[in-house]
Image (cartoon, rainbow, N blue to C red):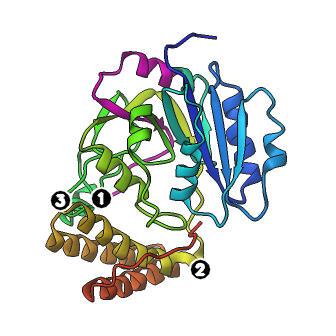
Amino acid sequence: MPKFANKIAIVVPTKDRPKDIRCMLTSVANQSCLPDQLIVVDGGDNIVEDVIKEFPTLNIRYLREYPPSLARQRNVGMAALDPSMTLAGYLDDDIVLEPGALEAMLAFWEKADPDVGGARFNITNEPRPKMIWLRSLFLIESRTQGNVMPSGFQASIGTVADTLRVRWLSGGATVWKRQVIDEFDYDEWFDGTGYLEDLDYSYKVGQKYKFVVAAEARVQHFSYPVRKDRNYLLGKWQAINRMYFVKKHQNFSIPLYYWSMLGEFLFNVIGSILQRDSGRLRRAWGNVVGLSYVAQGKVERLGGIFK
């Protein structure tokens, strides 16, 4: 097993996904380098402690945090870090590491520039969306991977061929310097699934540190589709949580936020027609209701789970 200067901990928030976390932990146990500490923070009704016991080769600490909230579960996990850890990251429970992924991530950090604060695994089954040119007109997307637009929208990252500098990091496949973890917490205003909590976290960290996607550290993400009965909630989140982010950081344009939300609404409507998906239409209605709240100054915290 290769030796590295850093010691790495991984925090895994989970909720009612025993099969997924078993697959994820199996992929970790089969790595050429094992994490020095692994913290599972369970917010589910069906606890997965028995699954954890199937992996005696992993140094796992199991914690319960109920009711579930992604941002809070991440904070609870990081609060339990061993003091000797110099790197700490998050893996979603539906991530599967490809062979050598953790070794490649540790090798990246051995040579990382001092001003790099966070690195994302390279998600090899994450395509960028279609019609980026059209989405770019509404400042929802950008041809520059991992960009953050003045509207407060973030560009997708996708799969990278070479290690890439980006301006934000998605939360569920990311490793941070210990200094970052000690200095920054996730904002627990983002309740439940925590839509945009990772953008908010990485954006504030990015005022001080640089980010990269480590091309050789490959993983796959087997994300669940949005539940049909949660599309209306997601539509409200798209409007309300985005405005919270825009107002919180104060260097984004509120008029451009409204322009981008118009695009979000239109893409939801068009998607519902082209895909014959009534859920996307409910999401579009959620956009309208969320925008009506925003226009009245009601940027209120919304809980819930949409997957």
Which of the image's four quarters has the N terminus?
Answer: top right
Residue 254: where, in percent of width, then height?
17, 72
Residue 108: where, in percent of width, then height?
42, 21
Task: Identify the amino acid type marked 1.
Answer: Met
Task: Identify the amino acid type marked 3.
Answer: Pro
Left or right side of 83 for 269: left
Left or right side of 43 for 117: left
Question: Does any portion of residue 167 appear in the rendered image?
Answer: yes
Q: Nearer the viewer, mark 1 or mark 3?
A: 3
Which of the image's four quarters has the C terminus?
Answer: bottom right
Which numbered disc flags the more N-terminal residue, 2 or 3? 3
User: Which residue matches tag 1?
Assistant: 131
Say few, some or many: other residues with alpha carbon within 10 Å of mark 2 (under 14 / 14 to 19 / 20 or more): few
Disc 1 element: loop
Q: Nearer the viewer, mark 2 or mark 1?
A: 2
Say few, some or many: other residues with alpha carbon within 10 Å of mark 1 (under 14 / 14 to 19 / 20 or more): few
User: Which residue matches tag 3?
Assistant: 150
Looking at the rendering, the stretch of residues picked out in magenta corresponds to: 104-131
